[in-house]
Amino acid sequence: MTSSMAHKFDSYWSKFHGIMVVATILDPRHKMKVMECYFPSLYGDGSSYEINKIQEVLLRMVGEYEQKSKASQASSSNRTHVSPTQSTMGPPKRKMSRFDQYITEVPCTTIHMKTELEYYLEEPVIPRIENFDVLTWWKANA
């Protein structure tokens, strides 16, 4: 691969990678815990830096969204919390078994949060279940 092609690929992948990370964090079964589990093996000593960088991007995105939302809404709607009623998954799939083990061993930490995103990230991940529909979950828990 030429230097120019490699640069284009790296540029594309970094954008795509960021989108995938955000999508994963917004899945209530994973949140930031999946990054805490896998980033040390991907980034070594730089994993904390990468995790902090992702948190900053998320907080910036939420801040921009909140500003736009406040400008376009005269009043806020009531929030409803509905828990999914699907059955619990059987044995963990091989590709996520490391994460499943990690999440059972790592204690949840409590930190005072300022934004809804931070409250969301502080809550424990929900159990991974078969046929989980993340869009339905977000519709019910928006």
Image (cartoon, grey):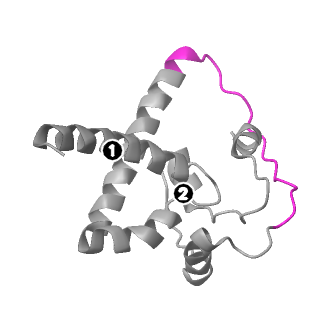
What span is in magenta? Answer: 70-88
Q: Nearer the viewer, residue 132 or 74?
A: 132
Q: Position of residue 89 (x, y in %)?
A: 79, 68
Q: Horizontally, is 4 left or right of 130 in the view?
A: left
- Dominant secondary structure of the magenta stretch? loop
Identify the residue under disc 1.
Answer: 13
Q: For this rendering, which residue is in front, 96 or 117?
A: 96
Q: Which mark is residue 121?
A: 2
Q: Amino acid at mark 2?
A: Leu
Q: CA distance from mark 1 to mark 2?
A: 25 Å
Callout 1: few (<14), some (14-19), or many (20+) C-alpha neighbours within 10 Å? Answer: few
Q: Give the mark nearer the N terminus: 1 vs 2.
A: 1
Q: Element under label 1?
A: helix
> What count of labels does the image hold?
2
Q: Please tell me whether residue 135 belongs to the stretch shown in magenta.
A: no
Residue lying at 71% horizontally and 28% vertically, measured from the top left: 77
Residue 68 in picture, x, y percent from top left: 47, 22
